[in-house]
Amino acid sequence: MITIREAAETVHMITSENLDVRTITMGISLLDCVDTDLSLLNEKIWNKITRLAKDLVRTGEEISGEYGIPIVNKRISVTPVALVGAGACRSPEDFVTVARTLDKAAHEVGVNFIGGYSALVSKGMTPADEMLIRSIPEAMKQTSRVCSSVNVGSTKCGIDMDAVRLLGEMICETAQKTAQEGSIGCAKLVVFCNAPDDNPFMAGAFHGVTEGDAVINVGVSGPGVVKTALERVRGADFETLCETIKKTAFKITRVGQLVAQEASRRLNVPFGIIDLSLAPTPAVGDSVADILCEIGLEYAGAPGTTAALALLNDQVKKGGVMASSYVGGLSGAFIPVSEDQGMIRAAQEGALTLEKLEAMTCVCSVGLDMIVIPGDTSAATISGIIADEMAIGMVNQKTTAVRLIPAVGKKVGDRVEFGGLLGYAPVMPVNPYSCEAFIGRRGRIPAPIHSFKN
């Protein structure tokens, strides 16, 4: 039973500490839309998305109104389009028509974003995979709500370095094609290792091939709630610190569980998972970096940051798994630079570097996220950064990701504005030394020895 005191605590979290349900994401399988005729393929995709998701936004708003719980985003994820479009698409331009269909469907049903303009190429690329990847720059230019992701590695398969090299080039091209908007197209493109099938968070969401026809996944967040809870135990020992984070994560996740079950019931779509991540926003008081400072750091990036983040990530997961039987997605702490005021401050002060962020990704949920780099950064350097992050995920059997934005015309110290949840960020310096000969090698990095478990 929920006590009056617990109910009052939840109300306070919502009204004063930025607790929200970050997203309700409906995953939709498009496998039954496959066709060899491009026009019929697009028609089937449009019909299925608009039929299944027509009430998603209204249902989210009704739940939010009835329970007083802010639900910030309503989103859709679909089966990786490289698979769906393989039979009909004969060129990158054909895939762009599918992106436009997804974008129109997203506008029609009113969701914020639609993810799944994706390819899964951890061991190699089919012709369709390569065409989709080459279509990404134009697709990002021509759409406003479509998000793209490419999984280029896994612990079981190794890393497809041909795909890594190609994506470095495509990120640069995407930046150029969306240069007038701060190269925002790159903010809608994620490169993964060990991507989960059930991630509700953009830009990396897609509906995995292991999923059913449709599913409801919910992502909860609450960095402000955790920070406030830690303020009450300032100076306490590590055991008290961990218990406080764990108990707070439990309460946050229970809110998400309630929303997920209600959305599932009202939409008559099965409940999938709760992603219990601490996902920051540009709002003051909603920062993962501020939690790290409350734990005892002057700035995120100071010595001790990786240990503090490891502690935070682990306790969030321990508290969350007690609150829901179905926890999945990425789950843990996100560290996107542009979406976190504390991270932005740390980067501006020089406390947070690209290399320190890479170290932090070894113990958090995602990877190098929403990092703006100089617009003249070479494609090979971007591919090298991607390769480093993929190696961390592959060897450590965890999900890692890269979302880099080479802002055209910007140099170190400049500031790039994206608006909304994407926020703004300072342009961070990149190691100037070349990795071109390394990236120029063909083939793939093999899976690590500990991958051979069966």
Image (tube, grey):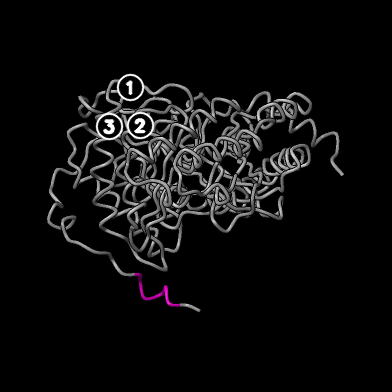
Above or below 73: residue 123: below
How would you rate the neighbour count of disc 3 (Cα within 10 Å): few for under 14, some for 14-19, many for 20 or more?
A: many
Q: Which residue is mark 2?
A: 185
Q: Amino acid at mark 3?
A: Ala
Q: Is residue 140 magenta?
A: no
Q: Amino acid at mark 2?
A: Gly
Q: Disc 1 and disc 3: Cα gap in Å?
A: 9 Å
Q: Are marks 2 and 3 in contact (CB under 8 Å)?
A: yes
Q: Which residue is mark 1?
A: 181
Of marks 1 and 3, which one's residue comes earlier in the chain? 3
Element at badge 3?
helix
Residue in the image at 60% along x and 32% along y: 74
Q: Looking at the image, can residue 120 be seen?
A: yes
Q: Are marks 1 and 3 in contact (CB under 8 Å)?
A: no
Where's the N terminus, which quadrant?
A: top right
Element at badge 1?
helix
Q: Which residue is mark 3?
A: 175
Element at badge 2?
helix
Depth order, front residue of 417/354: 417
